Amino acid sequence: MLALLLARQRVPVVLLEAHGDFHRDFRGDSLHPAIMEVLDEVGLADRVLAELPHRKVRQVTFPTRPPTSIQFSRLLYTRFPFITLMPQSRFLEFLTAEAARYPSFELIMRAGVRELIIESGAIRGVRYRGPAGWGEVRARLTVGADGRFSQIRRLSGARPIVLSSPIDVLWFRLPRIATDPEGVVGGAGHGHMLLMGDRGDYWQIGSIISKGEFPRLRAAGLDSLPAVLVDLVPWLGERIHHLADWSQVSLLSVACDTLPKWWRPGLLMIGDAAHVMSPVAGNGINYAIQDAVAAANLLAEPLAAGHLTDAHLAAIQRRRQWPTRITQAVVGQIQDRVLARMLRPGSRPPNARVVRALTRIPVLSYLPLRLAAFGLRPEHVRLSPPDGPSGQ
């Protein structure tokens, strides 16, 4: 997203992708209304919805007693009162294809960064390994946007502050049939919790487990997992035989951290490279894109004019750090006080009667919905529209 926004402003951008394609299993694929509005501001939202496979989630139901739902259809003042579930690989292909329409953009695949170029204490680019051997890109600014296992972060020597994460998630898929419910549903009880996302012809299922429990589960054999699924969501029983091997299951070791400083001269880190987000509430991709929008708004002009300073980089962290830290703190409380307790043997789903009573007050019911959809500080594209891809 940052590469696209800068290329639209005719800032020369080289995007390095370590892999040969964008396809990875079980990466974040929920676009919140805030991100759909960003796409709309650059004229791409309607095309994304028309050209890419997706599901619109208008309701999310939580496994409380009684069940509690968030109705995104109640959102006001937006064209997008829903969460868009879309394969991230297709979304990334779309963004890079759109960026490729601009002559100032270049994409290099299979380019794994191995070294930072450091001159007079500042980062001046990177050296990478590709199919043809070593390559080098020199740049006024290097941006680490390479996720929770960021190579750029590691090479820079930045040390994150690690926050508590008492859970892990097992991801897998099961077929979905037409009579199944829609949206995001789940189940909880007896020390287990499931969250299921409607992907059209299949369910993407996350089984939340206690941190470090996976080796014990694997040693016990795969038979225990289907039994948990059927216990919590009985209507999955007729298709549970599709889960036949541990190779169908991916472990996400949930982590949460933040860098005290997101930048150094010539280098900026954004998204999970700067602040690893828990998958709870699907904030990772959304906060990463909002970081990118803020960075583009603040950096396009100084990059184009050739007068980028440390103050510009520091301004991005000042703008984006506090909504990120508050969101991490809130999610941390949910993990510690709700999810971790639900995973204890003999636990029952939390009682939601007080919450449901409070949500009958219009302001109290709408504010959490708005925050879930747009975050604490939604970003908007402030750049002037370009004349066209060719600059004519």
Image (cartoon, rainbow, N blue to C red):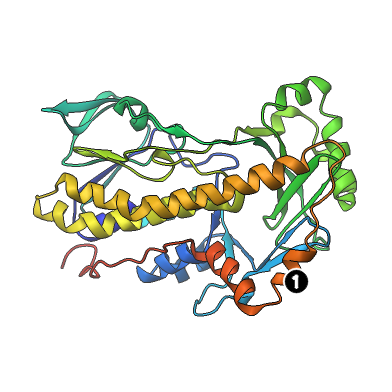
Crowd band around label 1 with a 10 angstrom C-alpha radius: few (<14), some (14–19), many (20+) = few
Q: Is residue 162 left or right of residue 182?
A: left
Q: Residue drawn at (52%, 41%), measured in percent from left and top?
A: 23
Secondary structure of the residue carrying numbered label 1:
helix
Q: How many marks?
A: 1
Q: Residue drawn at (36%, 36%), measured in percent from left and top?
A: 109
* Res 167 → quadrant: top right
Q: Residue drawn at (69%, 72%), measured in percent from left and top?
A: 359
Q: Is residue 100 above or below residue 50?
A: above
Q: Position of residue 68 (x, y in %)?
A: 75, 63
Q: Position of residue 221 (x, y in %)?
A: 82, 24
Which quadrant is the C terminus positioned in? bottom left
Which amino acid type is marked by label 1?
A: Ala
Q: Position of residue 206 (x, y in %)?
A: 70, 44
Q: Is residue 392 above or below residue 98?
A: below
Front in this rendered view, residue 324 or 145: 324
Q: Residue drawn at (27%, 56%), measured in percent from left and top?
A: 296
Residue 80 appears anywhere in the view: yes
Q: Is residue 190 left or right of residue 202?
A: right
> Where does label 1 land, which residue?
357
Which quadrant is the N terminus positioned in? bottom left
Q: Position of residue 124 (x, y in %)?
A: 17, 33
Residue 172 appears anywhere in the view: no
